[in-house]
Amino acid sequence: MKKKLIFLFFSIMCTQFSFAQSQSQMNNDSYKSYKKVDDELGVVYQKVIKKYSKNPDFINALRASERLWIQLRDAEIKMRFPAKDPRLEYGSVYPVCVNLCLENITKIRISYLKEWLQSADGGDECSGSVGAY
């Protein structure tokens, strides 16, 4: 695991050196990149809420799913960086790594939620609530 982290660190550093950024700036930039994706998730989530607003059972299930997804997202980060003091264990690149992981996990969630924004084709009994708005 440490070898992978070191490789990730050096990969990031090699690309970042060409921009001559400080660690603080890299942390900030990675957070902004994650925040942009997180904001997109909020937009997609609100679109799903609006589209299915007349289906309260779905809305309740979606909200419960989102709460559990947040717990899963946070647990995934803890699993990837399980040290008691992650900043000490993984170094100054830790915030960048966390932001990259958060961004990737959030992109997957966006992709998943976008399924409910597609029009139902009506022929798939296993699509469940997709298109039932």
Image: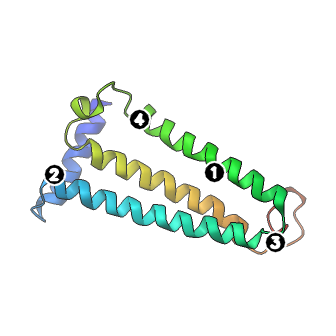
Q: How far, Cα to Cα, is label 1 from label 3?
A: 22 Å
Q: Earlier in the sequence, mark 1 or mark 3?
A: 1
Disc 1 residue type (three-letter): Glu
Q: Measured from the top left, where is residue 84 in percent x and y? A: 33, 24
Q: Which mark is residue 80?
A: 4
Q: Measured from the top left, where is residue 49 in percent x and y? A: 70, 66
Asked if the residues shown at circle 1 and circle 3 are in contact, with their CB atoms under 8 angstroms apart, the answer is no
**Position of 87 relative to 43 (above/below):** above
Q: Secondary structure at mark 1?
A: helix
Residue shown at the point (70%, 47%) measured from the top left: 64
Q: Which residue has dot 2 on it?
A: 23
Asked if the residues shown at circle 4 and circle 1 are in contact, with their CB atoms under 8 angstroms apart, the answer is no
Residue 3 vs residue 132, the one in the foreground: 132
Q: Which residue has dot 3 on it?
A: 120
Image depth: mark 4 or mark 1 in front: 1
Disc 2 residue type (three-letter): Gln
